[in-house]
Image (cartoon, grey):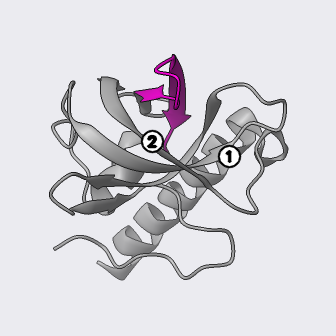
């Protein structure tokens, strides 16, 4: 039993580090997330990572579409996410580590639904990992 748990733990660590290597953390400013308020335009649940597309209106009413990446589905399941966590048209507040080149893509830190429910996607670097969902 202990060897099975150890094997699974090692496997998840390898998947997590492979996900980071996939895009490279140096592409994003991981020092502080930007706050975006908008509407879910798309939620893709799949490998190598999930994608959340959010339509964000600026003060002039112009819409910018942001694409935020999460870790792989298995990691996200451990954090309390499911393929039904987000719905198209849902109003959210998202915290995203933005791309360094100024494009509207990034790594999702966390997302807060209109009702206050919060889901962590990628914790702040150096912060303790969130407790697994029950």
For label 1, the crowd category at 10 Å Cα-Cα, with few meaning under 14, some 14 to 19 and many 20 or more, is few
Give the vertical position of 33 relative to 24 (above or below).
below
Q: Is residue 22 left or right of residue 119?
A: right
Quadrant where the N terminus lies? Answer: bottom left
Where is residue 52 shown, x and y percent of the image?
A: 41, 31
Predominant secondary structure, magenta span: strand
> Residue sitting at 41 percent across and 76 percent down?
130
> Residue sitting at 20 percent across and 43 percent down?
85
Give the vertical position of 60 relative to 9 (above or below).
above
Instruction: State the CA–CA distance, disc 2 to disc 1.
Output: 10 Å
Q: Secondary structure at mark 1?
A: helix
Q: Is residue 105 magenta?
A: no
Where is residue 9 shown, x and y percent of the image?
A: 46, 67
Mark nearer the N terminus (2 vs 1):
1
Question: Circle 2 is placed at which residue position?
Answer: 72
Q: Nearer the viewer, residue 102 or 24?
A: 102
Q: Quadrant of residue 132?
A: bottom left
Q: Is residue 56 magenta?
A: yes
Where is residue 38 shown, x and y percent of the image?
A: 38, 35
The residue segment tinted magenta is: 55-70
Q: Is residue 63 left or right of residue 90?
A: right
Q: Secondary structure at mark 2?
A: loop
Question: Circle 1 is placed at which residue position?
Answer: 20
> Residue sitting at 51 percent across and 17 percent down?
62
Give the vertical position of 8 relative to 97 (above or below).
below
Q: Quadrant of residue 40?
A: top left
Count of marks, rendered view? 2
Q: Which mark is residue 3?
A: none
Quadrant where the C terminus lies? Answer: bottom left
Q: Is residue 45 visible?
A: no
Where is residue 59 shown, x and y percent of the image?
A: 52, 31
């Amino acid at each position: 039993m202990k060897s099975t748990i150890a094997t699974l733990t090692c496997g998840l660590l390898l998947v997590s580090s492979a996900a980071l290597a996939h895009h490279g953390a140096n592409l994003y400013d991981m020092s502080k997330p930007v706050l975006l308020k908008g509407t879910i335009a798309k939620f893709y649940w799949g490998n190598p990572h999930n994608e959340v597309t959010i339509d964000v209106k600026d003060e002039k009413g112009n819409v910018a579409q942001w694409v935020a990446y999460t870790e792989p589905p298995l990691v996200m399941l451990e954090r309390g996410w499911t393929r039904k966590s987000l719905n198209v048209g849902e109003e959210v507040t998202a915290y995203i580590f933005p791309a360094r080149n100024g494009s509207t893509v990034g790594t999702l830190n966390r997302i807060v639904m209109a009702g206050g429910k919060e889901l962590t996607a990628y914790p702040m670097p150096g912060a303790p990992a969130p407790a697994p969902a029950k």
